[in-house]
Image (tube, rainbow, N blue to C red):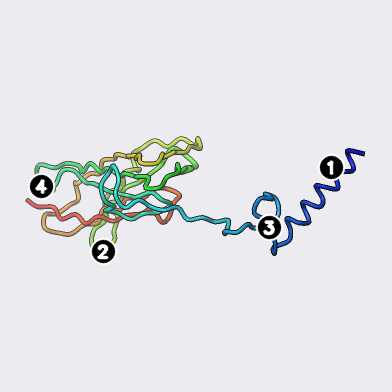
Amino acid sequence: MNFRVIVGALLALGLVGCSSSTGLYRWVPFVGKGGKSAAKTEKIKENGLFGPISGPVFYGLEMRTQVQPQPVKLPETRSLEVHVQLINRTKKPVNLRFNDSKHFDVLLRDATGKKLAQWSDDQPVTQNPGYVIVNPQERAEFVGNVSTRDLVPGRTYSLDSFVVGYDNMRQSTPIVPTR
């Protein structure tokens, strides 16, 4: 007898939950879409521990590319040290998944778009899938070196840095070496 009463009450609750006119659908988790849309957009903090946003933001991660040394003086500078920073500007952790050990890459191109140097050319790659988790108000930093052997003083070059597997996470930095 109790079993029949419980089953009947659950069925009645399910039917009432399907009714959009009562507003009870909000507390029945398996019925309806609820009062708000299922896809929420995360608010991005403009200021935080790492200062104001100065780079593009994708998936809640701000991408910054820093090149050292500045300015680039060619007779003295043999390679450029490139820092790619991913700063989480949301209130939730952001997971990045990768198919292998190559998480980022840096390309040095001339004005015509010809590739002069690539960081990953001389880096070993293992085929182990991996991931990077960036917690709120924290950052992940990747560092690579690019040779300056083909650069000519006074010409403009493009340093393209990107996160592998995430097409939107790409940034181009102009480089003009001096003598």
**Identity of the amino acid at label 1?**
Ile
- Residue placed under numbered mark 3 in the picture: 32
Q: With 152 as the anchor, is 170 left or right in this view? A: right
Q: Which is closer to the viewer, label 1 or label 3?
A: 1
Q: Which is closer to the viewer, label 3 or label 4?
A: 3
Return the x and y of residue 51 as percentages of the image width and height.
Answer: 25, 47
Q: With 27 as the anchor, is 50 left or right in this view? A: left
- Residue placed under numbered mark 2 in the picture: 112
**Identity of the amino acid at label 4?**
Lys
Q: Which residue is drawn at 18% across and 43% down?
A: 68
Q: Residue 6 carries which label?
A: 1
User: What is the secondary structure assignment of the residue under circle 2?
Assistant: loop
Q: Which is closer to the viewer, label 4 or label 2?
A: 4
Q: Which is closer to the viewer, label 2 or label 3?
A: 3
Q: How far apart are marks 3 and 4 (CA)?
A: 63 Å
Q: Distance between the residues labelled 1 and 4?
A: 80 Å
- Residue placed under numbered mark 4 in the picture: 73
Q: Which mark is residue 41?
A: none
Please tell me which of labels 4 and 2 falls first in the chain: 4
Please tell me which of labels 1 and 3 falls first in the chain: 1
Query: Would you call the spot at circle 3 few (<14 residues within 10 Å), some (14-19), or many (20 or more)?
Result: some
**Are dots 2 and 3 in contact, CB under 8 Å?**
no
**Are dots 1 and 3 in contact, CB under 8 Å?**
no
Q: Which is closer to the viewer, label 1 or label 2?
A: 1
User: What is the secondary structure assignment of the residue under circle 3?
Assistant: loop
Q: How far apart are marks 1 and 2 (CA)?
A: 74 Å
